[in-house]
Image (cartoon, rainbow, N blue to C red):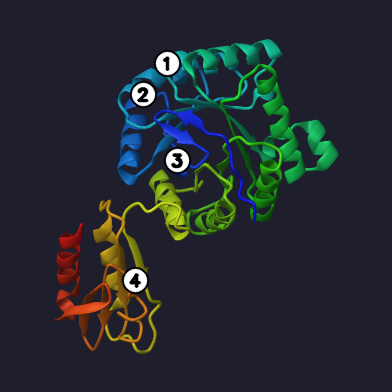
Amino acid sequence: MKKYKSRAVKVGPYFLGGDNPVRVQSMCNTDTRNVSETVKQILALEKAGCEIIRVAVPDMAAAKVIGKIKKRIHIPLVVDIHFDYKLALECVSQGADKIRINPGNIGSREKVEAVVKACKAKKIPIRIGVNVGSIEKDLQAKYGPTPKAAVESALRHVRILEDLKFHDILISIKFSDVPQMVEGYRLLAKKVNYPLHLGITHAGTSYMGTMKNAIGIGVLLHEGIGATIRVSLTADPIEEIKAGFGILSALEKRKVGPELISCPTCGRTEIDMISLTGKVEKALVGIKKPIKVAVMGCVVNGPGEAREADIGVAGGKKMGAIFVKGKVIKSVPENKILSELLKEIRKIV
């Protein structure tokens, strides 16, 4: 399978696309005009691993505080703008790292030119973001709300920027339907060589939304399509970051922090696997080293099947055998499994 290879575009300190790592981003759900609450959420997202953050800019009051927010955070700040090109100009002057717009919905060519000129001067890239619900009426009439319509919409906006000699472009075309999303990005990847931002729009809650994003984003990343991702969820944005890195880790695209593997339990299990695994997962939060930790229910699924793990435990009759690289180093009673396992983990991190 031929892998998609895009050009690289710089966003803050990161290069997106090319052979660069896939970056995980999220979007604030605070009122951007409330600087303290917005900064508080961004700092929490940074701690969770968020690498790029986007905020809504619905009016000039929000645009005018972008500089204040930018000064208090440590990751690239993207502004989400619709309809009013003056908001984009203000955000550029405030120091935004990237602008997300649809060039077709901010007015005349002169207005688009003004935004492009400002972005060129500050070397700020533009993401063209097409959602299934915002496809132009003529394309809807011609194709319906389909991947073909979304791709044509994106290309229409790309041509506007290219005609203005602007090429620091990223593109997204988002659907709520997974097969349509995958088809759309595959079509788009045949038409352009710009970095692509992946995501499923209005995907739903943490449960269903994570599954839909994992399938859609995962399939495309496996095919080499995608420079940056957002796992959109109706949930705390921190859950988006967790899910994003989970997808990258499962695909072995990024190794950031521990990977926990555990068996599904069965009639052979004689320890409280579900409780133990949950506690281990919580204890691993904050560790940055990419280690693999295994929690296995019995000797059948113990050091043998999990021998690739850096460290783990295999349950027995109210006890656990702790192993390192497949070799058992000690056996402990069930009530000491967690403390002894964490003690050994601390030795390697």
Q: Is residue 176 visible?
A: yes
Q: Quadrant of the C terminus?
A: bottom left
Q: Indicate the quadrant where residue 88 lies.
A: top right
Q: Which residue is mark 1?
A: 94
- Which element is circle 3 on? strand
Q: Position of residue 185 (x, y in %)?
A: 65, 45
Residue at the spot 38% in from the left edge and 76% down from the top edge: 263
Instruction: Please name whichever residue, 4 or 164, is drawn nearer the observer in this view of the structure.
Output: 4
Question: Callout 1, which amino acid?
Answer: Gln
Which residue is disc 4 drawn over?
A: 308
Alpha carbon distance from label 4 to label 3:
30 Å
Residue 124 % position (x, y): 50, 21
Earlier residue among tags 4 and 3: 3
Give the crowd class for mark 4: few <14, some 14-19, many >=20 residues within 10 Å: some
Q: Type of residue at label 3?
A: Gln
Q: Assess whether mark 2 and mark 1 are in contact (beta carbons under 8 angstroms).
A: yes
Seen from the viewer's position, the closer of residues 236 and 180 is: 180
| Whole-percent x, y for residue 345 in the image | 20, 64
Q: Which residue is mark 3?
A: 25
Given the image, on which type of amino acid does mark 2 rest?
Answer: Lys
Q: Is residue 42 left or right of residue 276?
A: right
